[in-house]
Amino acid sequence: MEFPQALQGFSGATAIGGLVLVDLMLIGNAFADNLFPTIGDYSKEPTWAIVVAVPLVSLAYLLGVLSIGASELILTSFRLLNKKVLVDDMIDASSAGEYVAGRFQQLRQEAEILGGGVIAFGLLGLGAALSGWKVEGWRRFLTTVAVAAVVFGICSAFLCIYRYRMAHDQAVAAKADQQRT
């Protein structure tokens, strides 16, 4: 895997995980009124950056990988993706040359990130809805955020499937091209 694609995979998973972490904090804040003030107090300590920064990036990456994996598991469970085709496509695309393999990998990474985004948007919708239930002055705004998160989650799911299908079509075309030559 080329370095830019590896960096894209890491940054994509970390971004999804960061969103999931924020979503989980919003959900937690709906039940613990002092969560954000406590985090604010701790973040003023000089050791905060040393003790928490690296583990938080690691946690964000792990949550992102878990979200991406969960979305792929859900898509294969509902038969929207075929596990065998996912593996076969990778083999077909990788044997078609560096450019085709690179483009295929980019499409697959985008599909994976969009799939993880479904989980992140779903949790954002839940966190906003719970906060809207608890914080009366912000109820309409947070309800709107929850509805928008659900809409973005649905759009992300459709785009995820679309990107997987684009990658599959590219792998099929690459295989057909190789068989002709």
Image: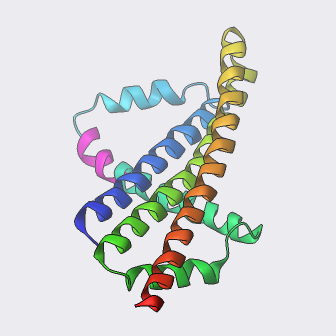
- In the image, residue 25 lies at what x, y percent? 55, 37
Asked if residue 100 lies left or right of residue 63, the reply is: left
Q: Residue at x 37, y 72 (%)?
A: 100
Where is residue 9, by image quadrant?
bottom left
Total count of labels = 0
Image quadrant containing the C terminus: bottom left
Query: In this view of the protein, which residue sits in the foreground, 30 or 82?
Result: 82
Q: Main secondary structure of the magenta part?
A: helix
Q: How is the image coloured?
A: rainbow
Query: In this view of the protein, which residue sits in the foreground, 44 or 63?
Result: 63
- In the image, residue 13 lies at what x, y percent? 43, 56
Q: Residue at x 60, y 50 (%)?
A: 159
Asked if residue 133 lies left or right of residue 160, the reply is: right
Query: In this view of the protein, which residue sits in the foreground, 94 or 145?
Result: 94
In the picture as drawn, the residue positioned furthest to the top comes out as 137
Asked if residue 92 lies left or right of residue 123, the reply is: left
- In the image, residue 53 lies at what x, y percent? 30, 45
Where is residue 126, by image quadrant?
top right
Position above or below: 68 against 21: below
Q: Which residues are magenta?
A: 48-55
Image quadrant containing the N terminus: bottom left
- In the image, residue 8 lies at what x, y percent? 34, 57
Q: Residue at x 49, y 62 (%)?
A: 65
Q: Residue at x 25, y 41 (%)?
A: 49
> Does the magenta run of residues contain 41?
no
Residue 169 in view of the camera: yes
Residue 128 in view of the camera: no
